[in-house]
Amino acid sequence: MLLEVKRLKKYFPIHKGGLFKRQEGVHPAVDGVDLLLRKGETVGLVGESGSGKSTLARSILRLTEPTSGEVYFNGTNLLTLPKEEMRRMRQKLQIIFQDPYASLNPRMTILDIVAEPLDIHFSISREERRERVASILQRVGLGPSILNRYPHEFSGGQRQRIGIARAMILHPELVVADEPVSALDVSVQAQVMELLADLQETFGLSYLFIAHDLSLVESFADRTAVMYLGIIVELAKSEVLYKHPLHPYTRELLSAVPVPDPRFRKKQERPGAPETPFRPHCDHRPEEAPRLIEAEPEHFVACHLRTAEINRRSREGFH
């Protein structure tokens, strides 16, 4: 197993008051998440804005320090590593950011932007540095002629390719793609997704792919996890989850996906407030959040009603 996340939590303090602010509680952005990711696999992470997807990804990489939990990468708990050891581990863990405009330093050349991870982790000659940057830029569809140019000279799709080159320059094992195509035109999205798939096949990468476009995740991810209010409420193989969702929130998300056929009309609903309609539908108890259980083979759901149903079946089978 490449990545194993156990009961990961990230709580942000809530402060109120004027000059002398006082803490009056916490916001559970990530509230006890369990997740597995195998070598060479792509796990899609979907959910509405504010569900905790990006916070989960950043907590796994320790770009945001988690409140508690465990994150095992190749058997090593990342959350217990000292700063220097974690820095070395980052050679194998990289991230592609959502905004190709904000993620590139406008004062740095493309050569320096893409070479920055090399400068942090290795001491190599200027010639080798330049050769390695030119090689990875060529691999993502950009030529070495852009090395001395600046980010403002490129389109959004080209900038995202530069960001991908920066993430790939160290040949990582796990790449977190945090909505990497959401800021791009549809035609460019397809090109970037094809590039990501090609890089995965070439380098044996594993992806944690975050997106709000459910149709995009369905075609790209091996398995899909659905996140809601800081927890994963459903996890299954993508083709199974999209055809046979078990959690009411997943069904609501899928019902909101537009269908490109003017003759087809369906009821499209947006997810309701945090207390409705999903928690009542899953018999949510405030003192006990539901845990992921295997409702069907390799199909996990966090829902008290499903847990009760499985327990009932087990008792009936036992007797």
Image (tube, rainbow, N blue to C red):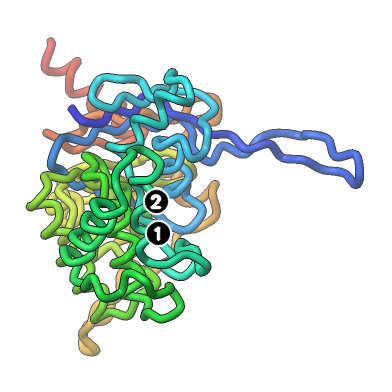
* Residue type (three-letter) at the residue carrying disc 2: Glu
* x then y, percent, for residue 233: 35, 41
Look at the picture and state if 211 lies above or below 109. above
Left or right side of 227 for 25: right
Q: Residue furthest bottom?
A: 262
* x then y, percent, for residue 266: 29, 75
* Residue type (three-letter) at the residue carrying disc 1: Asp
Disc 2 to disc 1, C-alpha distance:
6 Å
Q: How many marks?
A: 2
Q: Which of 161/70 is in front? A: 161
Could you classify mark 2 by the number of other residues whose Cα lies within 10 Å: few (under 14), some (14-19), or many (20 or more)? some
Can you tell which quarter of the image residue 119 is in? Answer: top left
Q: Quadrant of the N terminus?
A: top left
- Examine the rendering and report whether any part of residue 280 can be seen: no
Residue with the mark numbered 2: 116
Residue drawn at point x = 30 percent, y = 56 percent: 251
Left or right side of 58 for 74: left
Left or right side of 204 for 300: right
Q: Which of 293/40 is in front? A: 40
Q: Which of 289/83 is in front? A: 83
* x then y, percent, for residue 36: 25, 32
Residue with the mark numbered 1: 112
Residue drawn at point x = 34 percent, y = 58 percent: 114
* x then y, percent, for residue 246: 25, 45
Marks 1 and 2: in contact by CB < 8 Å? yes
